[in-house]
Image (spheres, helix red, strand yellow):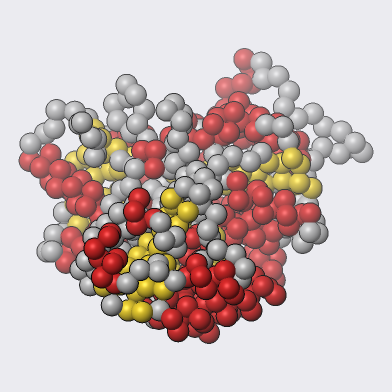
């Protein structure tokens, strides 16, 4: 039997990595990811988890070590945040185009300067185009479930791609809440041992990661792109298998009270829960408002998203990232691109909120919906609006 | 849903008491969240921790702005921090203090309902340390019934092992000595 416990989300993630029987964990601590790797190192030191914990000298080394261990055929896990994730950046591309299965939990945090340890999505959006599969959890249970799911998908021979599971720093990582920790037996059933198609083995030498001369580089990149697109089918398949074993159902896009909605909020990560409460409040007041939550960010599930929007005419998209000089935030840009020149497509308004730990409250969501309705009547001058900026 | 804000000083165990209440409520089958005030904390500096307890799934990640209950671990804090800020009209402030209700209202200007206990004295006598986080849970139980005593004792045993007995004694004494006004 699985057990329902009150547990800090970071500790629950570490327990999930243990249940997944990770074999190599190269990691470097950084706030707010610290508790995840601290707890894993304790589990290894106490012989509760039979794994190699590699206390590397930097995140660059952590990701390099992950590449080596995955190439050698070991189930590999690491975790990072913000500046640490950025320090990994060049190696992230190597892991993904070399098609090395591994799982990384990213405890999302703002990028300095000014120095901030608090939550937003700038760190992950910098890594958007690294070719990793990327999912977002909205609560502790999802953080655990998506971590298990990530191992299953990443190591699927039809996929063979690394995965980042995003959890909001502090607002998820440091909260104690009820979580069902699954049984070892069930996890073993869901997650068979890692059997890579190719691995580094002195008895059967192969070359991995050679130079890509202009005659092959394009094809390697196209193969990677095709693999990402094809991965969606196996991501969904693994969610179905997850439901069969654990009883919890996950979709790439989740709809909340979208029936007859005039305005749909679009969110990613833990603000989705507050957004649901905001939708309830607005529905109680007679407003036809719903919510779409993006769980799968890469590969982007365009078809599912369009279907989830249905006939709704106004989308209010919230980005937790402000790319200076861009036309709008990355989620807003993605959706504008998705609906470009499609007849009957909704009006899309882009908002930026919750930077560097700024709280996104029910009132903020109400403000965003009001603004989106006003913009639908009178086109705004700017392509996006930053919510809650103090003017003095 | 009940929302609690705990005021303490870094090192006094405010986060631990939030954790104990949340895990106890979850063990009772309820839904709960416990979280620190996110960010760096320094020993001795005023800090806060938060709890939510509900019979239904909790769907918010907002900070706690309008608590039903405020619990203050350190008697000197109401001079420095507006401990009753944002509290609901029918909310209650639970204080570690030697003062009477009238003195508290006059000195700190708190108009909410009050629950008061000299937790520092109890903690010194029962635990030998002026650490009041578990002692004050006795006052919380008496004033609110946010969680059952049995569940809370179990959470204490899990967290403190053989040290749980002393903490339970301090908690029990605070429960009996808490005055509600």
* Residue A16 drawn at (x, y percent): 63, 59
Q: Is residue B77 visible?
A: yes
Does residue B23 appear left or right of residue A183 in this picture?
left
Q: What residue is shown at x 52% (from left), y 73% (from top)?
A: B122
Quadrant (top left/top right/bottom left/bottom right) for the C terminus of chain A: top left
Residue A268 is situated, as x and y percent measured from the top left of the image, at 38, 48
> Looking at the image, which is closer to me, B89 or A120?
B89
Residue at position x 59%, y 39% in the image: A30
Q: Is residue A69 left or right of residue B159?
A: right
| Residue A345 in sight here | no
Q: Residue furthest top?
A: A214
Residue A314 spot, x, y in % from top left: 18, 46
Q: Quadrant of the N terminus of chain A?
A: bottom right
Q: Is residue B36 above or below residue A160?
A: below
Q: Position of residue A200 (x, y in %)?
A: 82, 37
Which residue is at a point 55% across and 70% down the rendered structure image? Answer: B123
The image quarter containing residue A188 is bottom right
Position of residue A226 relative to residue B159, above or below, is: above
Residue drawn at x 28%, y 52% as measured from the top left: A361
Which residue is farthest left? A377
- The number of numbered badges drawn on the structure is 0
* Residue at the farthest right position: A203
State whether residue B120 is above or below residue A41. Answer: below
In this picture, residue A114 sits left or right of residue A23? left
Q: Quadrant of residue A209?
A: top right
């Amino acid at each position: 039997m699985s057990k329902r416990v009150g547990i800090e989300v970071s500790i629950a993630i570490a327990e999930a990595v243990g249940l997944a029987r990770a074999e190599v964990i190269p990691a470097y601590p950084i706030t707010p990811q610290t508790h995840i790797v601290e707890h894993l190192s304790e589990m290894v030191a106490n012989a509760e988890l039979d794994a190699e914990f590699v206390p590397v000298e930097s995140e660059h080394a952590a990701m390099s070590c992950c590449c080596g261990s995955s190439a050698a055929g070991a189930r590999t896990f690491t975790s990072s945040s913000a500046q640490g994730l950025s320090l990994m950046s060049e190696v992230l591309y190597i892991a993904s185009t070399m098609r090395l299965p591994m799982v990384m939990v990213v405890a999302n945090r703002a990028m300095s300067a000014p120095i901030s340890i608090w939550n937003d999505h700038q760190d992950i959006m910098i890594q958007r185009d690294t070719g990793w599969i990327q999912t977002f959890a909205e609560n502790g249970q999802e953080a655990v479930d998506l971590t298990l799911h990530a191992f299953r998908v990443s190591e699927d021979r039809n996929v063979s791609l690394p995965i980042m599971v995003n959890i909001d720093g502090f607002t998820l990582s440091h909260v104690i809440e009820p979580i069902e920790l699954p049984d070892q037996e069930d996890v073993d059933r869901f997650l068979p041992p890692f059997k890579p198609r190719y691995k580094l083995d002195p008895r059967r030498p192969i070359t991995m990661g050679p130079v890509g001369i202009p005659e092959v580089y394009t094809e390697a990149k196209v193969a990677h792109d095709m693999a990402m697109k094809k991965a969606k089918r196996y991501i969904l398949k693994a969610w179905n298998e997850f439901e069969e074993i654990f009883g919890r159902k996950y979709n790439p896009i989740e709809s909340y009270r979208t029936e007859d909605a005039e305005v749909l909020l679009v969110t990613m990560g833990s603000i989705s829960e507050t957004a649901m409460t905001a939708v309830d409040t607005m529905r109680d007041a007679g407003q036809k408002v719903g919510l779409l939550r993006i769980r799968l960010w890469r590969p982007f599930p365009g078809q599912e998203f369009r279907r989830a929007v249905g006939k709704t005419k106004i989308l209010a998209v919230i980005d937790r990232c402000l790319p200076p000089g861009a036309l709008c935030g990355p989620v807003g840009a993605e959706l504008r691109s998705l609906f470009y020149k499609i007849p009957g497509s909704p009006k899309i308004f882009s908002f930026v909120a919750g930077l560097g730990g700024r709280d996104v409250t029910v009132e903020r969501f109400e403000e965003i919906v009001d603004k989106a309705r006003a913009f639908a009547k009178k086109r705004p001058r700017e392509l996006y609006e930053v919510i809650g900026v103090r003017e003095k | 849903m009940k929302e609690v804000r705990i005021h303490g000083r870094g090192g006094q165990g405010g986060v631990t008491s939030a954790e104990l209440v949340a895990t106890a409520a979850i063990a009772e089958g309820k839904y709960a969240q416990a979280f620190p005030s996110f960010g760096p904390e320094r020993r001795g500096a005023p800090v806060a921790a938060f709890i939510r307890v509900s019979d239904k799934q909790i769907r918010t990640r907002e900070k706690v702005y309008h608590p039903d209950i405020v619990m203050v671990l350190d008697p000197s804090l109401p001079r420095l921090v507006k401990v009753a800020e944002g509290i609901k009209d029918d909310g209650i402030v639970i204080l570690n203090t030697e003062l009477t209700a009238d003195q508290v209202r006059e000195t700190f200007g708190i108009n909410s309902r009050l629950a008061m206990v000299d937790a520092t004295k109890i903690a010194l006598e029962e635990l030998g340390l002026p650490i009041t986080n578990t002692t004050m849970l006795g006052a919380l139980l008496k004033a609110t019934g946010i969680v059952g005593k049995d569940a809370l004792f179990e959470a204490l045993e899990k967290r403190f092992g053989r040290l749980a007995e002393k903490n339970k004694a301090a908690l029990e004494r605070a429960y009996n000595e808490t005055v509600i006004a």
